[in-house]
Image: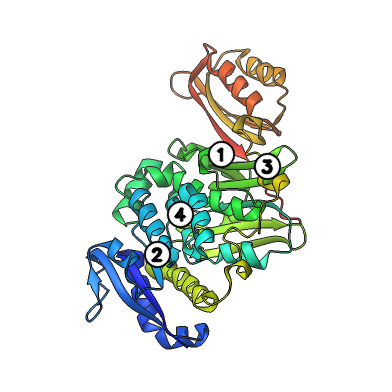
Amino acid sequence: MKPVRVGICGLGTVGGGTFNVLTRNADDIARRAGRPIVIEQVAHRSIHPDCDITGINATSDVFEVATNPNVDVLVELIGGYDIARELVLTAIANGKHVVTANKALIAVHGNEIFKAAHEKGVIVAFEAAVAGGIPVIKSLREGLGANRIEWVAGIINGTGNYILTHMRDEGRAFEDVLAEAQALGYAESDPTFDVEGIDAAHKLTILASIAYGVPLQFEKAFTEGISRITAEDVEQADNLGYVIKHLGISKRTDQGLELRVHPTLIPKERLLANVHGVKNAIAIMGDAVGPTLYYGAGAGAEPTASAVVADLLDVARDISTDHHYRVPYLAFSGIDEDVSQLPIMPMEDITTAYYLRLLAVDRPGVLARVATILAEQGISIEALIQKEATEGELVPIILLTHRTKEKQMNEAIREIESMADIAGPLTRIRVESLDEGE
């Protein structure tokens, strides 16, 4: 059959990996696709050192690829928002299919991009945008298509998981492990997107849209980072039978959909609690299948390239299929008003249990007053640890509460922090059981 001709925009880590996988495994890929997939053109500013593009048509202008009549599929691997959006929309306008690994682009501009692609009858594939080489989008969109998805929870940022893993295993401070992660190349020089949850929120937004059939709504995702987690918190969580993970969580409730990224205490026996280092894992609960787990390399040149090339295989197979019969971009065909308009719940309306750590003056009545404030907000205490007084007569107090609304907990924290006998801000970490249906 006629070859599918690909233009790759960006030859950095992922672009270089994609180029190498396509060339190295060309024969197997052609057999799987039923036709050759060949690299027609590449656009780059710099080239990954392991990537040899000798003999390949190369340019520094990505838009030259988007308008090249010989290119059937544009592979967008430049990252970012604005230029990537313009590039993808230009490619679509020129009748080209698109494969991208850009989670920020899909989370923020996906609704616009999919509308344009549908009108033009082209494919936009984005498996590599979430969890690198783990085929979670295809699994959620197709493999679990029979299920009503109840919740999705995942470790979807390897940098944060690396930091929390080493804090737990070695008792080190956040700043110390972050510096190590930067030295090893796991964290950027500006780690904000990773450690403050923005990267994970991009990915969670995409997963939630596919899981529940709702529009992409990144702006409504709640994000909280891990920079305030201390070695003391990690140790106390362990003493209470929990592990702290930076999770993206989305749940379907009677009030709407939860969409949140934050540090979370989960029981040690849970599958996600035992995912370490830079690995990613996503747990999905379906009403028919029950709990499933998708684990593997969430980043890296060839793991991510594996997902990019898998998308190219799908495009090669479907390129001649009427677009009305292809798998929908976000899993659901048409618009079901009852489902697509499900609201994203504000964080203050979400219910979880809580871990609280505070420093209090070692004085009679202080703990009683804290308990009273919690009780007045309808918050009951499940466990309490009061350690020996530290230097300066301050007593560390750790509380584990039963489930309550975030709004009530916020009010309780405000009152507790206003007490004269409480030193500094209180530490709050949400607790989730993530029932796996044992």
User: What amino acid is found at the position of numbered circle 4 in the picture?
Assistant: Lys
- Residue denoted by label 1: 236
- Residue denoted by label 3: 342
4 vs 1, front mark: 4
1 vs 2, front mark: 2
Mark nearer the N terminus (2 vs 3): 2
State the image quarter where residue 325 is shown.
Answer: bottom right
Mark nearer the N terminus (2 vs 4): 2
- Residue denoted by label 2: 94
2 vs 3, front mark: 2
Mark nearer the N terminus (4 vs 1): 4
Say whether residue 143 is left or right of residue 59.
Answer: right
- Residue denoted by label 4: 103
Q: Report the front residue among 187 and 98.
A: 98
Q: Which mark is residue 3?
A: none
Question: Residue 129 at x, y = what percent?
Answer: 47, 59
User: What amino acid is found at the position of numbered circle 2 in the picture?
Assistant: Asn
Residue shown at 23% from the left, 68% from the top = 59
Question: Residue 357 at x, y = what percent?
Answer: 55, 29
